[in-house]
Image (spheres, rainbow, N blue to C red):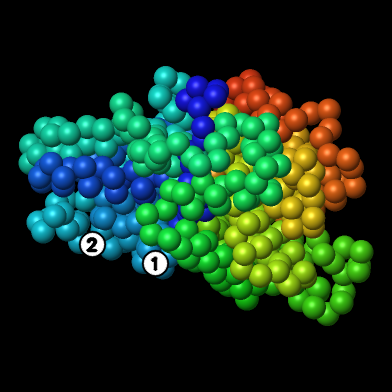
């Protein structure tokens, strides 16, 4: 899109419910596979079999992220928001036994081995997360081939088509903004960054109240995920030997065994652990803006809401404020670890949480923009190097650290006059350039950083 075109992203496209552990490697592939199935069925295409190749970062870390399972689920017609996490985990075994899936009232062959990981040093894929879907006849001849990309946060794009969300064909927004600076100007008139996004949603929604009830559903999903995580213990799957720690930290808090000066942050960090441990275990989480960074925004928000006793309208506004920051970052840089490293995931989530918390605490629009800028600036250059390709280390602690950074960024902005030397737009552009310059080893390939240092530990 051109630099001055209004941003037309929907709030409920940024907060999506789905299974862990990754929005780009699990949720996105499931959505792309499901769209491929739908497009075949729309054209009355009934193949004898299906083949899928996972390329680039999907090949490098897709096993640990469950990308193959996600594609099998999408081709079976499942949706991330409604799939049962236990059924999802059991799907490959079931398909290995049954060998077929329902396909428009008929059936077609689908086995786990029909999904392959294609490792190659060839960097010429259209995107670091590329998938090729093939529908074949009984002799193995191709009936249809489509290439899809998972571009971060569960968003998908068919090569040769539009990014799915852009296909909404929305009219121009009621309160247009195209970057952080125009968002700030509109926020001064509208009463806050979140108010801008909510005004646009109100003008776009077909049925009044549908966005508000969607936000209620997301809020309940945040809460439910924290609750499950705080009541779970044991080792996370994948063979890394990482134990769940949310329950233990939370218990220490309840027993008054943490320093009182640390308790507000510790509560948020226990919530972030809870969410990210659920994510690592394949449980249901919400992209905020991604699965890998799903803990920071809800942890900060839930802690603030409980501590300050905030109501429904304030919660919706805070969610909209966080979304406004993600919209600017996604439009002008990226929220994908495979594109720009972890600065695009944990950095973006920290900026969203800092902005929402600053607004909750009474920050002016300038201070809120400044809080987001600080949150992102101090994650610049953060690489993505998950050990064993699992979304566990450094990811889970990194989310807990994101909570502390978001809290500090909100406070630093609140206790300053507003805009600093670096604007939100400048730091977003810098993040993009830093990501472009980053070696691919540090962009969700597990070929650099902690991922390769681990065997020496
Ligand atoms: S290191 Fe960051 S970007 Fe990479 S998988 Fe973990 S949370 Fe996601």
Q: Is mark 2 within 8 Å of ligand 1?
A: no
On screen, residue 431 above or below 80 = above
Q: How many marks?
A: 2
| Nearer-N-terminus badge (2/1) | 1
On screen, residue 434 above or below 373 = above
For the residue pair 13 and 130, the one nearer the viewer reads as 13
Report which quarter residue 365 is drawn in: top right
- Residue at the disc numbered 2: 97
Q: Secondary structure at mark 1?
A: loop
Per the model, the C-alpha gap separating discs 2 and 1 is 19 Å
Residue 84: image tag: 1
Query: Residue at horizontal 39%, vertical 40%?
Result: 170
In this view, the residue farthest toward the bottom is 255
Residue 191: image tag: none
Q: Is residue 108 visible?
A: yes
Mark 1, Cα crowd under 10 Å, few <14 / some 14-19 / many 20+, is some
Residue 423 placement (x, y as % from top left): 75, 30
- In this image, 11 relative to 72: left or right? right
Q: Is residue 112 visible?
A: no
Kindly indicate whether the residue at mark 1 contacts the one at mark 2 (C-beta within 8 angstroms): no
Q: Secondary structure at mark 2?
A: helix
For the residue pair 17 and 207, the one nearer the viewer reads as 207
């Amino acid at each position: 899109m051109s630099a001055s075109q209004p941003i037309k992203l929907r709030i409920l496209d940024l907060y999506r419910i789905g299974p862990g552990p990754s929005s780009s490697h699990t949720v996105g592939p499931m959505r792309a596979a499901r769209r491929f199935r739908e497009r075949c069925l729309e054209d009355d295409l009934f193949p004898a079999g299906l083949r899928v190749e996972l390329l680039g970062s999907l090949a490098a870390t897709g096993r640990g992220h469950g990308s193959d399972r996600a594609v099998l689920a999408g081709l079976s017609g499942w949706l991330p928001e409604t799939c049962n996490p236990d059924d999802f985990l059991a799907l490959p075994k079931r398909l290995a036994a049954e060998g077929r899936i329902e396909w428009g009232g008929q059936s077609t062959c689908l086995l786990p081995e029909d999904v392959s990981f294609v490792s190659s040093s060839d960097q010429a894929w259209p995107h670091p997360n590329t998938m090729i879907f093939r529908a074949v006849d009984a002799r193995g001849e191709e009936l249809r081939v489509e290439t899809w990309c998972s571009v971060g946060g569960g968003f998908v794009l068919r090569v040769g088509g539009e990014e799915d969300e852009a296909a909404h064909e929305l009219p121009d927004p009621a309160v247009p903004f195209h970057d952080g600076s125009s968002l700030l100007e509109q926020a001064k008139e509208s009463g806050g960054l979140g108010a801008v996004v909510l005004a646009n949603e109100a003008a776009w929604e077909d049925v009044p109240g549908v966005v508000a009830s969607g936000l209620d559903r997301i809020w309940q999903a945040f809460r439910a995920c924290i609750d499950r995580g705080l009541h779970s213990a044991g080792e996370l799957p994948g063979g890394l030997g990482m134990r769940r720690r949310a329950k233990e930290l939370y218990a220490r808090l309840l027993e008054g065994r943490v320093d009182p000066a640390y308790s507000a942050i510790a509560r948020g960090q226990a919530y972030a652990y809870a969410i990210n441990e659920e994510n690592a275990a394949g449980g249901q989480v919400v992209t905020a803006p991604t699965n890998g960074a799903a803990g920071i925004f809800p942890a900060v928000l839930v802690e603030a809401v409980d501590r300050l006793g905030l109501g429904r309208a304030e919660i919706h506004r805070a969610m909209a404020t966080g979304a406004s920051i993600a919209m600017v970052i996604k439009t002008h840089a990226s929220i994908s670890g495979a594109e720009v490293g972890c600065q695009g995931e944990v950095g973006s989530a920290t900026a969203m949480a800092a902005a929402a918390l600053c607004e909750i605490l009474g920050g002016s629009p300038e201070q809120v923009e400044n809080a987001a800028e600080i949150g992102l600036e101090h994650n610049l250059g953060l690489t993505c190097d998950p050990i064993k390709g699992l979304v566990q280390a450094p990811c889970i602690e990194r989310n807990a650290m994101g909570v502390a950074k978001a809290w500090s960024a909100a406070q630093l902005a609140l206790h300053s006059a507003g805009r600093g030397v670096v604007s939100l737009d400048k730091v977003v552009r810098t993040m993009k350039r830093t990501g472009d310059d980053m070696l691919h080893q540090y962009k969700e390939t597990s070929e650099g950083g902690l991922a390769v240092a681990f065997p020496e530990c």
